[in-house]
Amino acid sequence: MNNATRCAAVRAATLAALLFLIFPLAQVAVAAGSPSQATKLLDQTVVDARRGLDLLGRRPECDSHRLGLVGFSFGALTGAMVAGSDARIRSTVLLSGGAGWATVLSRAQPNFPAGEAPFDRDELGALDPYAVQDWVGRIAPRSVLIANGIHDEVFPRPSQVAFRRAAGEGSVLFWWNGGHEPFSGPQGPAVLLRILGFLQTTLVNAG
């Protein structure tokens, strides 16, 4: 998450009167480690995020019945797992995500072509229970917005499409005319407004 993305998140919280809990994710560790090591990190990330929900639920200024999640890039992947496994999350926004752990691992390994992971199929099998598209499908019927850049330089189009197709009926899907970072280009204000409108409808103004 770059500074533009962080600033947009803070701005969104201010404009929409939302309380945000922001924490970084160690995606580098997933990329550098083996699939079995990645599963441990993914498990811990989901546990940490759900502990964050516990914390927000105890805050007097936070409505525990209006909890949402916004995930960007690797955070969209793990965010899908969190939202798919925890019904306390009422509304979910997943930005710049993609399906397929082979793609995720290969993108972090410059010596391997896109879509080919530096591990064999048996090793990658350890990540089968973490298939992001399966977790995206479990979010429904709760609200979810999935958005991607048309010119994303991290996730190739087939990976993006598989991620989006997994969303349940009634999900909000849109593309922005830009790359992986949703807020760093001229499309940033429009993307932010779409996200704010979605959160206002599904969290702030929801009955």
Image (tube, rainbow, N blue to C red):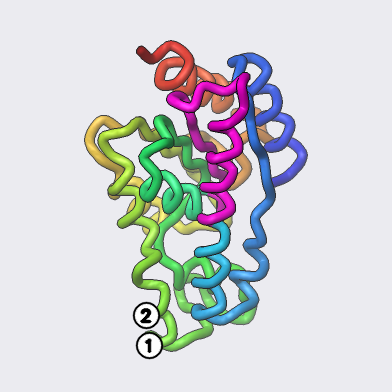
Q: Position of residue 113 (x, y in %)?
A: 53, 76
Return the x and y of residue 128 as percentages of the image width and height.
35, 72
Residue 159 vertical position relative to residue 8 in the rendered view, above or below: below
Residue position for label 2? 125
Residue occupying image coordinates x 55% and y 19%: 193
Residue at point 59%, 43% (across, down): 52
**Element at label 2:** helix
- Please state the extent of the stretch shown in magenta in the rendering: 46-75
- Could you say where residue 6 lies in the image, as x and y percent from the top left? 71, 36
Q: Amino acid at mark 1?
A: Asp
Assign a secondary structure to mark 1.
Answer: helix
In the figure, is residue 184 to the left or right of 126? right
- Residue type at tag 2: Gly
The structure residue drawn at horizontal position 62% and vertical position 19%, both measured from the top left corner, is 61
User: Is-magenta flag for residue 59?
Assistant: yes
Relative to 161, 200 lies left or right: right
